[in-house]
């Protein structure tokens, strides 16, 4: 059995991860921790143009990737099989697509 656990790294997201841990253990489930990044677009700040915008977006994505991997590592430290996924797209449709794929 697999559990797909979406997180936004908020306090509620941490609560969901804790609940997933409690649920996965007795089921012997593999936990897929997923965070959906919305495609960058529009105004990002008063930097020096598109290059600064891309650099800021890349930094955000690297940090979100670090966080999702950290969440999966925390579950592995609890003895669970866990994988962290960072995907890009419209959140609801992307989560549905990933659930169907996994």
Image (cartoon, rainbow, N blue to C red):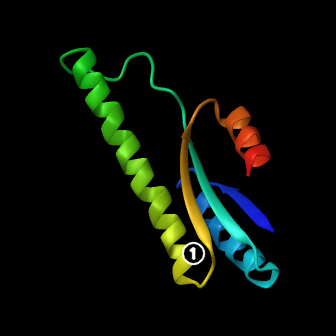
Please state the horizontal and vertical placement of residue 26, each as a whole percent of the image.
Answer: 79, 84
Is 79 placed left or right of 49 in the picture?
right
Q: In front: 35, or 101?
A: 101
Farthest-out residue, front = 101
Q: Residue at x 76, y 80 (%)?
A: 28
Q: Residue at x 54, y 32 (%)?
A: 38
Q: Residue at x 37, y 49 (%)?
A: 63
Please state the horizontal and vertical placement of residue 17, each as a whole percent of the image.
Answer: 64, 67
Please state the horizontal and vertical placement of residue 6, each as a whole percent of the image.
Answer: 65, 53
Please state the horizontal and vertical placement of residue 45, each as a whole percent of the image.
Answer: 30, 22
Rendered position, 86 above or below 57: below
Farthest-out residue, left = 48
Is 19 placed left or right of 27 in the picture?
left
Q: Residue at x 56, y 52 (%)?
A: 85
- Image quarter for residue 4? bottom right
On the image, numbered disc 1 is attached to which residue? Answer: 75
The answer to whether one can see residue 5 in this image is yes
Other residues around mark 1 within 10 Å, as few (<14) / some (14–19) / many (≥20): many
Rendered position, 84 above or below 28: above
Q: In front: 98, or 46?
A: 98
Q: Secondary structure at mark 1?
A: helix
The answer to whether one can see residue 16 in this image is no
Rendered position, 71 above or below 58: below
Q: In front: 37, or 85?
A: 85
């Amino acid at each position: 059995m697999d559990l797909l656990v979406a997180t936004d790294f908020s306090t509620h997201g941490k609560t969901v991860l804790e609940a997933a841990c409690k649920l996965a253990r007795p089921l012997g489930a593999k936990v897929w921790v997923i965070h959906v990044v919305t495609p960058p677009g529009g105004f990002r700040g008063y930097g020096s143009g598109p290059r600064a915008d891309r650099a800021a977006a890349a930094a955000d994505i690297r940090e979100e990737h670090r966080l999702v991997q950290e969440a999966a590592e925390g579950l592995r430290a609890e003895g669970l099989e866990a994988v962290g996924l960072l995907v890009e797209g419209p959140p609801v449709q992307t989560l549905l697509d990933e659930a169907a794929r996994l």
